[in-house]
Image (cartoon, rainbow, N blue to C red):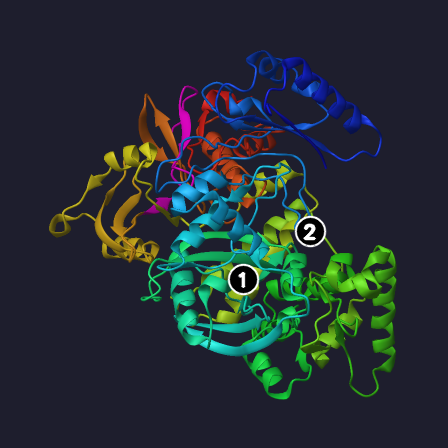
Amino acid sequence: MITVTLAEGAVTLQGMRARLNHLAEQCSAEGSPPGVAFIDDIDGDGFPEELAEELLGHPQDRPYSLVVSGDSSRLDPARFASWIALTEPMRGELVNGAVRTTVSFGPERERASRLPMVSAQQAAEFLGLTTGRIRQLVAAGELRRAPIPVRDLVLRRDDVERYANRRVSAMTLRVHDVPTPPEPRALSYESLVFVAGYQLHIRLWRGNDETAVLLVGQLRGQLTLPREQVLEVAAGLFHLVPGIDPSSTSYIELHTGDRGDLEKYTLREVTFQIPDISAPEVITFERALPVEWDELLRALGTRPELYHFHGYTAPVIEEHLRTRSPVPVEDDRFKVRTKVKWLEALDRLGDHPVVESLTRLIVDDLWLSTRTPSGVRMALDDTGEFWVDDSEGHEEDLAEVRKIFEETVARVSSDLRGRDRYQVAGYPWAPTATQYVGFSLPPRLRELLAAHPDDSFSYTREEGTRLRSMLLDLERENEEHRPRANADLYEVAGFGLDVMQPRQRLSLEERARQLLDLPRPSHVDRRWELHPSDPVSAAYLETIAWQDDRASDFTAAEKADLEKCAWLFELERWGRAPDGDLVGTGRNSSGHTWVGVVQTIASPRPVQPDDALVSARITGGDIPLFLERNNRIVAMVPSHNVYTGMNYGYGGGGPGEAACAVVDLLERAGHPAKDGGFRKIEARLEDPMWAEGTNVGLLVRDLLN
């Protein structure tokens, strides 16, 4: 790093220019380190405005970064590469200086970010100390110098605040604040615990410096906890784990999450503030940020033991803690047992025309899952096998499966083999707490796989329409409230509806139109959280004819439908929308207002070219779309549940569902979408400008060809 400081003593303007020119020459040479010019204008009169304007006017010509301290009323910080506010701090309040720079500082790899900092004088005034005492605290390691290339002493604001509050409060450590240990930290505590209603895998490492790292593992199948539950869990752990001091502990969560068709362990650090150390059960949430495995390894000095994803469960962890040896775990990631149950249920249907197609889909799904490169990546493990036929007399079948595996791996890039194969499969390193065990195929599936050695097939439009209609009928006949419903048949019908879609030989427009043409339920329930500042949802609720419970025209079945869609909240009132939909509102246990609607799918909503399509406030999940005419909501666009509900601004199922609904809305109103119409509408609903906190707004005229 090459640095130069300007406005030191009585340096002239000519001298400053000479320093900058020399810095530019040094930084421009090939292989030279990055340069930083530190401009000190703390007194407001030491830095010539002529030179400031010269530098600000041609930032593209500078081969170095600028870091400025001074009076922001004279020099606009937005025009500099970096800015540190170091002027006139108020007692009890540290100035939050925002530094943005493109260089990396020191071995701790402080990346380009917003980094709050204060000067030594500011820190002294805030703490009621002298600047000499501040320098002593830095030398003793109790305060940390900020990682910027300047000679003046500049400190991290959060370090100063933590030092000021440590006698009355405590804050957990960020991972990058944990010192690199001279030798690996020792695992001092490990246990499966129940806290705040959750079972968690807890590990605590501690070093000779008494700094600790607490790793909170959330078991397979657990979702990321909401903030309120995270606070409960942390408060419970600070009481439960022996000898833990939150102020010298870094709190890290370990999650098992999806990564496409793979899974992946991810880390997240959570910082907590304990306002009063005499009452440690009261904590507040500061921030939650992702953490890289390299940073955790640096803080620990050792690798934590890992479990295979499918083995990160309470029974497996308990056995490993008891035996301290790898636990064999069977991996049924392709749900072979479930598929066998489905086949048994289909057998009871006799010669029903859907049986053969669903059986083929089950076998096809097994073959495709295990033979594609993505399937290979999922199953990379200790043995390198997915499932095996280990019964006597099937050695040739087993050899064939292994041959298929080897051929598939050969088609995948070479980095899937050797030591790196676990990283490609989603692990930072090879699991050692568990040992993979292949799944033994039952005889029924062995026979089917032998009968269909290459079972990849597809459908024409007519075949797909006929099969999808049969699957929809089978699913409806076995819904839980129907007499003689069969849960296995309901599940396998849903499975068939999911996996048959990509097997159709159709264009995107043809597939979307086919989905809309197929038989659909007459009613669909929708629900969304009412944002307090959402004008669209408020305007929709103003159109509802609210009912008096004693004089309601709702039938018992309609009330039951509305109750079914309002499982998240308790209905407080209900009514009917202008287009006939049933609408209810109420509050959930957290006090948030929700809206539930039972939509009539079949009836058309008249659409005019001057109408607009507007959405409720985007907050995530299924967001409704409304038809607006003359600044008044006239209808809610029906959702056909082609995908998983409407959402906007990303290339997932939500925009596709909304596009299908809009195409159907327009076609029913006499505005058929021509070739490319679906793509055009979907692209508009995927527009990244539809971000969280906004409302979609599209003119119908712009969507018509």
> In x, y percent, where is residue 13?
63, 14
Q: Residue furthest top?
A: 50
Q: Which mark is residue 252?
A: 1
- Going by the numbered disc 2, the residue's amino acid type is Arg
**Chain part drawn in magenta:** 595-619
Task: Name the magenta segment's main secondary structure.
Answer: loop
Q: Residue furthest left?
A: 550
Q: Secondary structure beneath disc 2?
A: helix
Find out whether residue 205 is within the magenta segment.
no
- 489 in relation to 227, above or below: below
> In x, y percent, where is residue 93?
37, 40
**On the rendered structure, is 625 left or right of 541?**
right
Q: Which mark is residue 687?
A: none
What's the residue at 49%, 57% (across, down)? 270
Dot placed on the residue nearer the N-terminal end, 1 or 2 = 1
What's the residue at 26%, 48% (across, down)? 585
Q: Where's the C terminus, which quadrant?
A: top right
> In x, y percent, where is residue 478?
46, 66
Q: Which residue is mark 2?
A: 503
How many other residues sit within 10 Å of disc 2, few (<14), some (14-19) or many (≥20)? some
Q: Where's the N terminus, which quadrant?
A: top right
- 365 in relation to 525, above or below: below
Q: Nearer the viewer, residue 368 or 245?
A: 245
- Going by the numbered disc 1, the residue's amino acid type is Ile
Q: How many marks?
A: 2
